Each structure stands twice: as structure tokens, then as C-alpha cells.
Amino acid sequence: MVDDPIRKHLDEQVRLMRLHRGGDAHLDAAAAAGRDDFLRDAELMPANGDWNTLLAFGFDPPVLTEDELFFRTHLPAGWAKTPGELPHLSRVLDERGLPRVLVSYKALPHDRRAQFHIVDVGAHFACEAVGNPHAGLPERWIDFTILERRQFVQYLYTDRAWLRRYTPPAPQAHQQLQTRARIEALLSIIAGLPDRDSLGEFVTDPQFDVGRPRWRQRFGAALTSLTRTMKGNST
């Protein structure tokens, strides 16, 4: 029988399509296994990402490895890798236990890639706070730096400005009202803080041209866009 490379390629694509349609559990297991391998080696970090910021954090200069997806480095003292929310995601926590880097490693035979994004700490926790039906400051607020607290508050002002300009479809209107109410509740809590003045001034103009809040282009985008990219590019 003649070895037909085109037929072999098509058969492989059919196999992967069938696996994708009915075997998400297998894909998740493969991704989780790759993530676990990454977590076991404390010195590995993806080559694709903002290494200038990692160096500023205190990471050692990257060293090439046999795997082009990864560099070898040393994390700053007290920093550690932990599993993320999805099978292919990991986080790098600083000495306070706060997320500073989000890592995506998709370890599938037909689609293998790795990258990382820097976490905007304040925006990350602000995003979680706005999504929490019980409005309140994060438990880790006391551990935030002044800059991280400013990031948190600016996210609230920015998202409020955007929500005032955006009219959602009818099914989402009630949800938007709830989100706006949570933002106002959080801003009221912050206004009563003893150190509120130390946070400075923020953009409060509802006509401020924010597009979609810029936090989505920083950490907020990290989880959402990484998940979309990693899944979308596999189709």
C-alpha cells in the first residue's frame, strides 16, 4: 500500500475533531498533566512574555533550555507557582501570596504552546470584588501597596464610566444594574477609609473615553483572552 501523507493528515484531523467533540475530559487531562510538569520544575518559565518586568520583579536572567517554549530562571525569594482555575493555567504568587504572573501552558501533542502575562494586582481583585454579590473590600486589602490600592479604585471608576455609556441588550440590563450597584457600594466603602486621601485622585468623568476598561488589556485580559486564544487557535 502506498503511504499517502495527505490521507494520513486528514485522518489525523478527523481523529482530533472526534476527540475534541467527545473527549474534552481527555484534553483537560492532557493539559493538566502538562501544567503539573511545569509546576514541578520551579526554575521553568515560558519564553513568551514580558521578561523585562520579570527581571524587575527579581527573577534571574533567563537561560536557554532544550525546549524552545521555556527559559530557566530562579523565582524571587518567597515566590511560588500554584495551579490556576483552568487545567492549562498556573499562577506565580509573590511573598505575600498575591498573584503576580499568570502562566498558560497548553501541553497537547497537536497544539503545544506557553506564554505568561503580568497580573495587575489591584485590577485583579477589583474584578473579583465587582463580581461578588456581597460587596466588600478584599480580605487581602491590608497587604496591598498604595499603587495596588490605586489600581483597585481606578478600576472601579473606569468600569463605572464605561457602564454608564454602554446600553446592554434587554436580557443583560438587570445584571448591569446589579454590577453598577456593587461598584457604587465599593466606592462608598472606600470613601470612608481613614487613608482614602493617600490614594489620590481618580478619573471620575463618565464621558471619559475608556472604551472597554483598560484593566482588560492588563490582568483582566490575561485570563479571559488567554482562555479564548488557547481554545480558539486549536480549532
Image (cartoon, grey):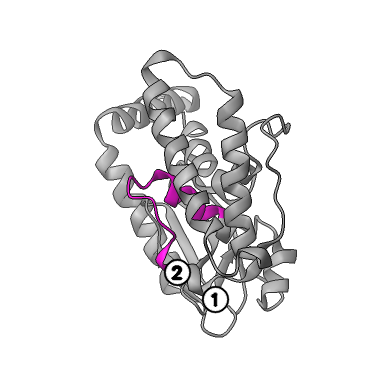
Task: Determine the secondary structure under disc 2.
Answer: helix
Q: Indicate whether residue 214 is drawn in magenta.
A: no
Residue on which disc 1 sits: 43
Label 2: few (<14), some (14–19) or many (≥20) C-alpha neighbours in 10 Å: few
* C-alpha separation, residue under disc 1 versus residue under disc 2: 27 Å
Viewer-proximal residue among 72 and 226: 226
Q: Write the start and end of the magenta stretch as one range.
A: 123-140
* Snapshot quadrant of residue 131: top left
The answer to whether any part of residue 117 appears in the image is no
- Residue located at (43% from left, 38% from top): 181
* Amino acid at the residue labelled 2: Arg
Asked if residue 27 is positioned above or below residue 59 in the image, the reply reads above
Residue 187, image x, y percentages: 52, 50
- Residue located at (75% from left, 65% from top): 52
Viewer-proximal residue among 15 and 164: 164
Q: In the drawing, does residue 130 fall left or right of residue 45?
A: left
Asked if residue 218 is positioned above or below residue 58 in the image, the reply reads above
* Snapshot quadrant of residue 73: bottom right
First in sequence, mark 1 or 2: give its number. Answer: 1
Residue on which disc 2 sits: 140
**Screen quadrant of the N terminus:** top left
Task: Determine the secondary structure under disc 1.
Answer: loop
Viewer-proximal residue among 98 and 199: 199
* Amino acid at the residue labelled 1: Glu
